[in-house]
Image: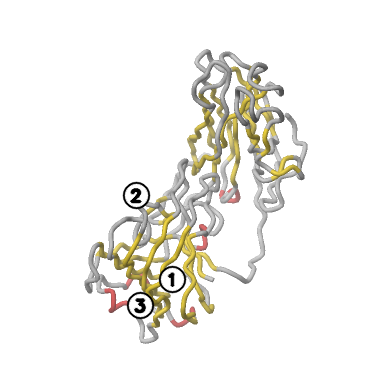
Amino acid sequence: MSGARYPPPRSFQVHQDMLVATTHTLSLALLLPVAAFAQGPSVSPTFYANAEALINNVFPFGNTAVPFRYEQIHDDVPTMAISGFRFRHNATTSVYPAHTVTLDGWMSTALTPSTGATNAFDNNHGVDKTPIINNRTYSHPASDPTNVPGLFVLDYPFDTPFFYAAPVGSLCWEVIVTAKTQTASVVHDAASTVNLNPVLQVGAGGTGCLATGRTSAMSATGTSTVSWSGGSGTLTVNGTNAPASAPSFHCLGFDKTLWAGFLPLPFAVPGSTGAPSGTCNLYVDPLFAIGARAGTTGALTSAVPIPLAPTYHGVALYSQWLSLDLAANPTGIVTSRMVTHGVSAPNPTTPACRIFLSGSTGATGTIAQAYMLVTQFY
């Protein structure tokens, strides 16, 4: 399982220029392609179209308060006919549940750029203010925490499209949320002020299986340390509940959809279903396997040096632990869940603002400059 056997998935087109594996460490060089701009959905801020933003928020769709009045002004949306907008879950190691949201919405060419907005909702709209959503209920799926960044699955197609002409002014949209079914917060990806040294964004998903002598499934967690100014960092994956003192491997790769380019993932280890281990899943197509030995308590750790540069912005790396356990199932392998590390480079300014009011539909709210939900317009 060691050595560079297969290229990364085409969706990443990542070239590994300096990959060196040892028993304890691995150096990675990632090169993202410069992709030509294509027509289609537009993400604001554009910087986070393919990378996790660095903060999160629940306003106005994800908290439990109703009514909730909310407005957002964007300075970077191109000229386009807009028939809806989408949002994404914040990266996390847990699942946000499926839920519904009911709201009314409006869109206009803002009277001023975001920096000139006021806390009076109506005073930010232009003369072309248009109703886009009319008392409509939307159903949203549960999150997939293995995705960093998340997919834009929190979708709000409009009842009435809006044509936005970018050179004229900024884009303003407003919603009044009148009903929600979630009983706890559903956290959305958001962007705000500049962060010059962002850590890797972490998600996790799937389930581990049961090693011999354990009462809880194998698991894995991820952390990182970074020095963007120094151009380097460390990706760390810890494991728990592995077989005592077992030879183990930190499997690391860029693909969580296909093993060796043809076998769909996740893939159940042969013979594990119905065995004492329960079903053990392979979640990662490993470019490298880094050897380690579990402690007597089943603890594992792997620290991987990585280079950092703005060109790596948006790269995702997938990890899981695999341990040898001959008594657990016929194949003699037990596995942990998967951990995702997403690279988000230091962010530029945030070209938007928001105005919000909880529990009321009043005329004025609280304004926050350079603060926004990451939004996809289509």
Q: Amino acid at mark 1?
A: Asp
Residue 201, labelled with which disc? Answer: none
What SS does tag 1 mark? loop
Quarter holding the N terminus is top right
The residue carrying mark 3 is: 112
Q: Residue at x 62, y 31 (%)?
A: 279
The residue carrying mark 1 is: 75
User: Could you say where residue 299 lies in the image, as x and y percent from the top left?
Assistant: 51, 20
The vertical placement of 170 against 213, above or below, is below
User: Could you say where residue 28 lies in the image, as x and y percent from the top left?
Assistant: 64, 37
The vertical placement of 321 against 73, above or below, is above
The reply to whether dot 1 and dot 3 touch (C-beta < 8 Å) is no
331 left or right of 360? right
Q: First in sequence, mark 2 or 3: give its number.
A: 3
What SS does tag 2 mark? loop
User: Could you say where residue 207 lies in the image, as x and y percent from the top left?
Assistant: 55, 35
Q: First in sequence, mark 1 or 3: give its number.
A: 1
Label 1 vs label 3: CA separation?
9 Å
The residue carrying mark 2 is: 184
